[in-house]
Amino acid sequence: MTTKPKNAKTDRNGRREAVLEAALEAFSARGFGKTTISQIASVSNVPEATIYEYFRNKEDILLSLADQFVHTLHRDLEVHFLGVEGVINRFRKFLWHHLYAFQENPAYARLFSLELLNNPRYRNSSACRSLMDYRGELREIIRDGVREGTFTRRLMPELAEIMVFGTMHHMILSKVVLGKPLELVSRAEALYDLFMGAMLTDNYPPGEVIREENSRRRDILTAALYEFRESGFQQATISKIAKRAGVTEPTIYEHFKNKQELLYAIPEAAMKGYLVESVDADLANLDTPAHHLQTFLLHQIRSARDFPAYYDLLTTELRSNMSFYRSPHYQSLREYSARLMGILKKGANSGCFRKDLDLPAARDLYFGTLDELTLSVVVVDGSGRITAYAEDVFDMILHAFQVREKAGPAA
C-alpha cells in the first residue's frame, strides 16, 4: 500500500525520504497545522516544486509517515513473533513491542497522539488500513485465546482490542501532552496485569445457579441442567444424568420420581438459590465502589450517545490539543478524572477492588477504553450503538480491577 500519487518519481536520490524525515521533525516540533511545505523544503534541501512530485499535499506527507511507521512496526512484530508460542506469550510480546516502539520513537509518539489517532480523517483514510492490519494481529491473539479457553468466552475480541489499544495510547497521550518522559516499557507489567484480569478465564469462575444445601441433590440438578441443555429433554436419560452427576440411577430416584419432576425442579432450585440471593446482594450493594464505577461508566457512555457533537469535539479537537491542557479550562476534565480516581481509591481501600491496584494504570485503562470506543463507534461510524457495549465494557473493566479469586472446577 502507498499514499503517494501514481505519477510520483522513483526516489533515486533519497529525496522522498529526506522530505519525510524533515516533515517528521517539523510536525513533532511545531505541529502539523503550523508547519508549511516551504519549511519542509528548507529543512530537507528539496525544492518545494520537487516535493509535489512525490506528495499531493502536506496531509499526504503526514499520512505517508504514519503508513511507513506502522508498516515497519508490523514487520518488526512478525520478526519478534518468530519462535514465540502460546497466546499469553504472544499477547505479552505485542504489548511490550508496541510500547517499546513508541518509547524509542518519541517523534512518532507525538505524531500519532497529537495528529493522527484522534483524527477521523486519518481513521477513514487508506493509510489507516496498515494500522488496522497491525491491530488485527492483536485481535487474532485475543480470538485464539477465546477459542482455546485461555481467555473467557464471554470476551468480545473486538472490544478487548479496543481496551488494549485505547489504554496504551491514552497512557502515551497523557505523557506527551504533559511533557513527561516516555517511560512506557516500565509500565508494561502494570497494564499486562490489568488486561489479564479483564480477559483470563480463571478470573471468571463459573457460577452455580443451583445452590441446594443438599450437595447430592445439587449435583443431580446441575447435571440434569447441562444434560437437558446439550441433549434436549427428550434425548436426555436418567442414566446419562447419573453418569454426569457421578451417582447411581437409584440415587436419582431417591430424590425425584422421574425425569419430568427433575426438569421442573431446576427453576425452583435456581430461584430459591442463586437468583433471589443475587438480586438481594445487588440491592444491598448499591453504594459499593463497584456500583459507583458502573454508574460513572454508564453515565459517560450515555452522554456519548446523547451528545455526539460534544464527544466529537472533545475527542478530535481537544484530547490532543497542547494549549487546552495548559489552559484553566482543562481543570474541569481534571476534576472529572479525579472523581474516577476517588472511586478507585475507595474500592481499593475497602477491598472491593484489589488493594495493590495500580491507580494510574487503572485510570489509563478506563479512559483509554472509553476514548477509543467513543472514537471508533460514535465519531467514526456516526452511530448511537455505543450503549450496546456498556455491559461488556463494565464487565471487562470490573474484572481488571477486582480481587482475583481462584476458579473452581467447571460444571
Image: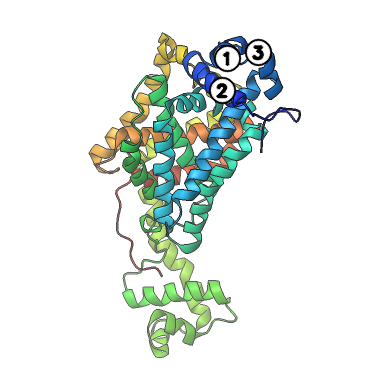
Chain-order first, disc 3 or disc 2: 2
C-alpha distance separating marks 3 and 2:
12 Å
Q: Nearer the viewer, residue 269 or 304?
A: 304
> Which percent across, then down, holds residue 24?
52, 22
Specify whether 204 is left or right of 237: left
> Which percent across, then down, holds residue 354?
27, 44
Disc 2 is placed on an element classified as: helix
Tell me, yes or no, if residue 150 can be seen here: yes
Disc 1 is placed on an element classified as: loop
Q: Nearer the viewer, residue 110 or 367?
A: 110
C-alpha distance separating marks 1 and 3:
9 Å
Residue at x-position 34% and y-position 37%: 185
Instruction: Give the image quarter of residue 397.
Output: top left
Three-letter residue code for mark 2? Ala
- The label shown at residue 18 is 2
Residue at x-position 46% and y-position 15%: 322
Residue that protrudes farthest toward the bottom in the picture: 250
- The label shown at residue 45 is 1
Residue 209's place in the image compared with 252, above or below, is above
> Which percent across, then down, holds residue 104?
40, 32
Residue at x-position 58% and y-position 21%: 19
Labelled pair 2, 1 in contact (Cβ < 8 Å): yes
Disc 3 is placed on an element classified as: helix
> Which percent across, then down, holds residue 160?
49, 46
Three-letter residue code for mark 1? Asn
- The label shown at residue 48 is 3
